[in-house]
Image (cartoon, grey):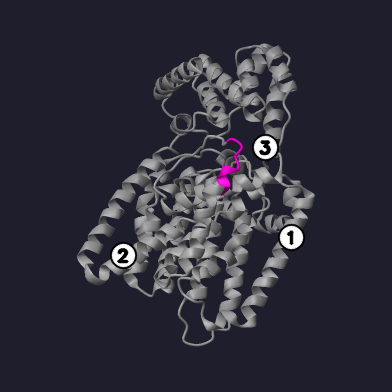
Amino acid sequence: MALVAGVAYTPSLGHGFIYDDYWTVVGNRHLDQTLKQLLRAAASGRSVEWKMPDATRPAMGVSLWLDRQLFGLSAAGHHLHSVALYALVSVLVLLLAFALFRSFAAALAAGLAFAVMPLHSEVVSAVNYREDLLAALGIFAAAALCFWPARGVDKWRPYAVAALWFYALASKESALVAPLLVAALSLLRPLPRWTRQGSLGLAVAVVALLWLNWRFGLSVLGEQIPRADYSSWGERCLRTLRFELWSLAESLLPLRARPEYDPLGAPSWSWILAALPLLALPIALLRVERARPLAALSCLALLAPLLTSPLFAPTNELADRYCFVGSLAAALAVGWGIHWLARSHALVALTLLAGMCVAGVLQCWSATSVWQSEVSLWTFAAQTAPRSPRSWSSLSRVHRMADQPELARRAIERALVLKPDFVPAQVACALNELWEGDRAAARRVLSTVVPKSDLHREALSVASRCAYLPTDAAAGECARRAVPKGMVLGDPGALRAISERLLAQGSESAAGQ
């Protein structure tokens, strides 16, 4: 299982750093401290005061610290760590599926299905999103322990489950949903008798109280996670219904990978009519004994991404990583289906598994190739999410790196048309003006910027420092250097060809409207 998972994402080993890796990995000077200093800072909240990336996720910080000690700033070493974690998570899916179905065929099919899902390319290919791998590791291991067959009462098991959940919470806040996921899985197989004893409930309650107390204290010191602004709680709830429908589809059919999504408009009240039948589906399925597995998997797919939904207002309303844990539902569905098919048609089941592995590995290679360089990432993002201002502002930065000023200007204009107050686009526009020698225009742009996060403030500080240098030449040179260290550009020729075509298509569309 580990080998198949590793082969599926082997191409990422040849990639450089990408996306937010420059902020959380390459430019994270706090990783040069000792492990003892990092752990003390995480426990006390000093890491939040330092504005350390992922300060609220200490397990992620420790993981990156280990990479820094072992590999320095070698991207290959960091990617190798992520692929190894993904292989381990896939093995845990196999073990969890065996604990639920008590069938080797079902476990093998579920593990293989999970290992070759192209939806996982974001989590594996971008080191910054390793936190989802770490959280899934803790959640799946804890769930496997809960359902694993036991001959007697293992006194250590409740505390091991609680410790694994604590590790998942220290990796990412969305792991708080783990008890609900175990409850959903109990529809597939009832929890063993030992789980109903007081020791497990007490251990889990202690972990929840300790973590919530610590996390609330950090939020008082300063919240790192940027939040979206919604006009009302009614809009937030409607967006959540729409998100749940999207996540249900993506979790059960994890065959498509996208690094960026178009922003969604305000939902109408008709989303309630669309959502109610699907949300009521698990309840209806529970009444039919043979359909209980479908009810369990539907509940799992709906609950797993709940803490990343608009109910909690993350800046990105949609992202592939939100469905990483939820895609376990699709893996278990494949395991359940192969289990029944193998009873009467073992050769057919084996053939289907082999075909799924080959097709899945090829799809994973294709999805991973998008994360190879800045050119491949942002040209693909602009093609698949043409209404996203982030796609165009990032593409403008890539054009600036490739010394293509006209395309850089046109791309940033597109971003600002889509969202005039988008801070990364405003900063990129100012840097473009400096690059072309117009400090006055850059200062005018910067004077209108209202930063909304620490990352915005840092980018604004860099651009402002360049804009107020004494000469145009010095400002232009500063703007040229204002790209993250270690950024891999890619093929400038392909960048120009794709971008010119996309910008031309966009101009024709705007003229038609």
Q: Is residue 284 magenta?
A: no
Q: Nearer the viewer, residue 131 or 260?
A: 260
The answer, for residue 71, to whether it is visible in the render is: no
**Regarding mark 1 in the picture, which secondary structure is present there?**
helix
Q: Quadrant of residue 356?
A: bottom left
Q: Which residue is mark 1?
A: 214
Instruction: Please state the extent of the stretch shown in magenta in the rendering.
Output: 265-272
Relative to 186, does residue 50 appear above or below in the rendering?
A: above
> Does residue 234 appear in this view?
yes
Three-letter amino acid code of the residue under disc 1: Trp
In the rendered structure, the answer to whether residue 47 lies left or right of residue 411 reads right
Q: Gap in Å between the C-alphas at discs 3 and 1?
A: 23 Å
Residue 418 placement (x, y as % from top left): 59, 25
Compare marks 1 and 2 and give the one earlier in the sequence: 1
Q: Please give the residue where the numbered disc 3 appears in the rendered image.
A: 455
CA separation in Å, label 2 and label 3: 47 Å
User: Which badge, 3 or 1, comes first in the chain's sequence?
Assistant: 1
Q: Secondary structure under badge 3? A: helix
> Total number of numbered labels?
3
State the residue position of label 2.
338
Amino acid residing under circle 3: Leu
